[in-house]
Image (tube, rainbow, N blue to C red):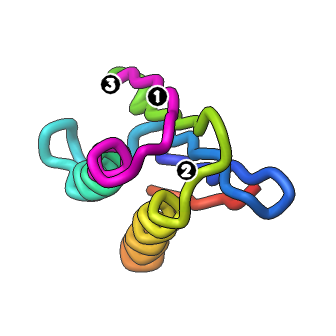
Amino acid sequence: MIQVIVKKQSENMTGFHMEGHSGYADRGSDIVCAAVSALAINCVNSIEKFTEDAFEVEQDEEKGLIDLRFVSEPSERSVLLLESMMSGIEEISKQYGSQYVTLINC
């Protein structure tokens, strides 16, 4: 299962932690894993391209890990990009089931 945890501190987003593989299908054919990965990678790339926000990111393809942490409070643009990613992941979870992907707000 893919677990996506949106990190918050005093209601302010501080990043996200995504880890795992959905197990929906075999590696290379897993549309759930591909969709969630595309949303997360696009979010990271968009924050880098369209904002000035400083962040750190850790990735490990074998673990299915993407961990993004903002160095300081994120801008409204970054928050919007994160909310967009979360909306997409939430819809995937609804469509395919929480046994494959879950979204947690902390």
Answer few, some or many: residues within 10 Å of disc 3's Cα (few below 14, many 20 plus, some between 14 and 19). few
| Callout 1 amino acid | Val
Residue at which label 3 appears: 61
Q: Taking the image as drawn, is residue 23 in sight? A: no
Pointers 3 and 1 in contact (C-beta within 8 Å): no
In the foreground, 58 or 13 = 13
Percent across and percent down for residue 68 are: 52, 37
The residue lying at 26 percent from left, 57 percent from top is: 35
Pointers 2 and 3 in contact (C-beta within 8 Å): no
Q: Taking the image as drawn, is residue 42 in sight? A: yes
| Callout 2 amino acid | Val
Gap in angstroms between the C-alphas marked 3 and 1: 13 Å
Gap in angstroms between the C-alphas marked 1 and 2: 15 Å
Answer few, some or many: residues within 10 Å of disc 1's Cα (few below 14, many 20 plus, some between 14 and 19). some
The residue lying at 59 percent from left, 51 percent from top is: 74
Mark found first going from the N terminus, 1 or 2: 2
Percent across and percent down for residue 53 are: 48, 43
In the foreground, 22 or 38 = 38
Residue 49 forms part of the magenta stretch: yes
The part of the chain drawn in magenta is 42-60
Answer few, some or many: residues within 10 Å of disc 2's Cα (few below 14, many 20 plus, some between 14 and 19). many
Gap in angstroms between the C-alphas marked 2 and 3: 15 Å
User: In the rendered image, which quarter is residue 10 located in?
Assistant: bottom right
Of tags 1 and 2, the one toward the viewer is 1
Residue at which label 2 appears: 4
Residue 16 forms part of the magenta stretch: no
Percent across and percent down for residue 50 are: 31, 54
Residue at which label 1 appears: 57
